[in-house]
Amino acid sequence: MEKKNLDWANLGFGYVQTEKRYVTNYKNGAWDEGVITEDANVVLNECAGVFQYAQTCFEGLKAYTTEDGRIVTFRPDLNEQRMKDSCTRLVMPTLPDGRFVEAVKAVVKANAEYVPPFGSGATLYLRPYMFGTNPVIGVKPANEYQFRIFTTPVGPYFKGGAKPLTLCISDYDRAAPHGTGHIKAGLNYAMSLHAITEAHKNGFDENMYLDSATRTKVEETGGANFLFVTKDNKIVTPKSDTILPSITRRSLMVVAKEYLGLEVEEREVYKDELKDFAECGLCGTAAVISPVGKIVDHGKEICLPSGMGEMGPTTKKLYETLTGIQMGRIEAPEGWVVEIEL
């Protein structure tokens, strides 16, 4: 199979339209069989539920070429479960068991020519999403929905390597107790846009959100979980009912314990502890781990000992081990790497 004639080495992290996408519709209480289509456009009534009341959720995962030439995805079953949780919370229908992973495999197979070659640093990003489609004017859930997956080849999130980020502690709340912070709802990200725009204007790369109840505990950024390394090399991640359960973060915790032999702890992390950590990273699908070098709390700088030059040593080991598993250089735990049969 020949790959598309793209400049793989210079791809940015943006949308490049591919030829095929997966679409299935929910109507009269049931999902249709679903199809692969070439039509990239979505046509909806002006009163569709997604427009009026933001009834939509999404996922994000990647397909890539391993060192031995296979096309694989990483833990899509966890994306399926997380999307079910999002749908349930937003009163949206869930896909039949296994349909999500089947759709992922089908859409990657249909766009196999767009999966970047091994060693290019690029991957095929998948965006599964669901939204209410029928007209809804009263405040209530829609009764018709569409689920789609499109793909786009993307370059590495950080061109030229991951340079440590500077964060600011945000004055805005990302999520409320008993709210929607634990699901991947579009509305959560819409609410974060003002805060991230303001952070960028002030010279920061990202926000660090605190819990809205006490504003004393670390939660997450607008789109990634935190991972901290203590000075005695223990891995610590914040525990909270209002943060999104990152698949990358959960995988890194297993890597830390089972592959690197490190002690791992998931617990409440207080803002006052930040000065005591040796390293800090942001965990997510796009970059795997983004190192953090500095956190600014209303003018007070908290400088991590790992510095602003490069990833800290433990963060780097975690990154290299997980990406090694994803790319087939290191044996993966059972079920983590799912091959696409062409």
Image (cartoon, grey):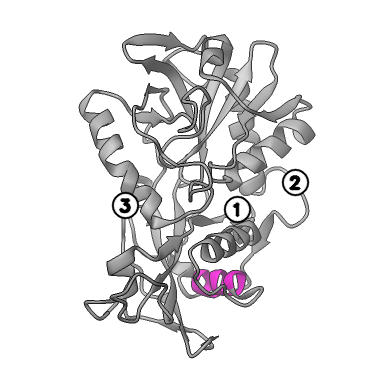
Q: In terms of depth relative to the viewer, which is nearer, 187 or 120?
A: 187
Q: In terms of depth relative to the viewer, which is nearer, 243 or 211?
A: 211
Coordinates of residue 252 in the picture (x, y in percent):
65, 37
Query: Image quarter for residue 104?
Result: bottom right
State which quarter of the image contains the C terminus.
bottom right
- Classify 10 Å Cα crowding around label 1: few (below 14), some (14-19), many (20 and above): many
Q: Determine the CA span between mark 1 and mark 2.
A: 12 Å
- In the picture shown, does residue 25 fall above or below 153? below
In the rendered structure, the answer to whether residue 77 lies left or right of residue 41 reads right
Q: Secondary structure at mark 2?
A: loop
Q: In terms of depth relative to the viewer, which is nearer, 298 or 206?
A: 298
Please name the residue that numbered disc 1 is placed on: 66
- In the picture shown, does residue 330 fall above or below 201? below
Please state the extent of the stretch shown in magenta in the rendering: 100-109
Please name the residue that numbered disc 2 is placed on: 331
For image coordinates 46% across by 12% down, the residue present is 307
In the rendered structure, the answer to whether residue 318 lies left or right of residue 304 reads right
Please name the residue that numbered disc 3 is placed on: 14
For image coordinates 33% across by 53% down, the residue present is 7
Main SS of the magenta segment? helix
Q: Amino acid at mark 1?
A: Thr
Q: Amino acid at mark 3?
A: Gly
Queried whether the magenta region covers residue 103, the answer comes back as yes
Coordinates of residue 154 in the picture (x, y in percent):
39, 52
Q: Disc 1 or disc 3, which is closer to the eye?
A: 3
For image coordinates 63% across by 72% down, the residue present is 341
Coordinates of residue 147 in the picture (x, y in percent):
45, 74
Coordinates of residue 182 in the picture (x, y in percent):
54, 48
Work out which residue is located at the far front of the displayed protein and give it: 138
> Of marks 1 and 3, which one's residue comes earlier in the chain?
3
The answer to whether marks 1 and 2 mark residues whose Cβ atoms lie closer than 8 Å is no
Queried whether the magenta region covers residue 94, the answer comes back as no
